[in-house]
Image: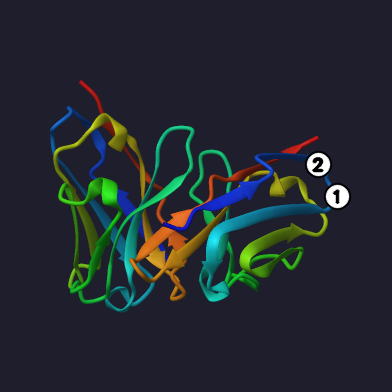
Amino acid sequence: EVSLVESGGGLVQPGGSLRLSCVASGFTFSIDWMHWVRQAPGKGLVWVSGINGDGSNTRYVDSVKGRFTISRDNAEDTLYLQMNSLRAEDTAVYYCVKDGGYANFDVWGQGILVTVSS
Amino acid sequence: ETVLTQSPGTLSLSPGERATLSCRASQSVSSSLLAWYQQKPGQAPRLLIYGASRRATGIPDRFSGSGSGTDFTLTISRLEPEDFAVYYCQQYVRSPPAYTFGQGTKLEIK
């Protein structure tokens, strides 16, 4: 069974850092693009970042460029999101997502809550 | 930047009725890169339709997608109680690379 399990969320002060992890299972992790998508409380979905199979190509939404870094460890089937200089507006549930091959998102983790507040 | 606008914001229907949800793009979108998702409260979204009209694995055939260019539609032919949820369209643009979602349509029980 295909599965994505996120961890590393929690409460952090503005300006702080947090690293999210996502462990994948049930598919060949090293082949697929992987992404992070977030959803602020009561709001819609926003794509945050994506990375290709070997980690050589990364993309970010403008609002997180220079602050967030996506990476992956294919030996451990794990996706990461390093989040620095966090702001209140980064408060959201963050989903780890597998690319379905047509730039869509065919497998989603359960989501992990990140709260940025003093 | 290509913006996706979904309408209506909220759709109130009864089980057994037909639902038609719209997604309009601010500029032409490749049909192969347009998808629809369903999200229920407290759950992660689920891929329903990709390539504008292809059902994802395990999606019932009462869900169908259509459209091209700037206008896309998700149709649910006969609503079941479990279909009441929020629906999002999503597209990918190659240059510059960007993935964007519509703001969502809430399908509620009338």
For residue A43, say whether it is visible.
yes
Kindly give the residue lying farthest to the front in the view shown: B27
Q: CA–CA distance between discs 2 and 1?
A: 7 Å
Percent position of residue A66, x then y: 15, 50
Q: Is residue A65 above or below residue A44?
A: below
Give me the chain letter of mark 2.
B
Q: Secondary structure at mark 1?
A: loop
Q: Which residue is mark 1?
A: B17
Give the numbered dot on residue B30: none
Percent position of residue B32, x then y: 54, 75
The quarter of the rendered structure image containing the N terminus of chain A is bottom left
Residue depicted at x 34% and y 74%: A32
Residue depicted at x 31% and y 51%: A6
CB atoms of marks 2 and 1 within 8 Å: yes
Q: Is residue B104 left or right of residue A18?
A: right
Label 2 environment density (alpha carbons within 10 Å; few <14, some 14–19, many ≥20): some
Q: Is residue A110 above or below residue A73?
A: above
Label 1 environment density (alpha carbons within 10 Å; few <14, some 14–19, many ≥20): few
Percent position of residue A98, x then y: 39, 65
Q: Which residue is mark 2?
A: B13
Q: Is residue B65 left or right of residue B56?
A: right
For residue A1, say whether it is visible.
no
The quarter of the rendered structure image containing the C terminus of chain A is top left
Tell how many labels: 2
- Label 1 amino acid? Glu
Please tell me in which quadrant of the rendered image residue A58 appears. Answer: bottom left
Which sits in the foreground, B22 or A118?
B22
Q: Secondary structure at mark 2?
A: strand
Give me the chain letter of mark 1.
B
Percent position of residue A80, x then y: 21, 56
Q: Is residue B77 left or right of residue A82?
A: right
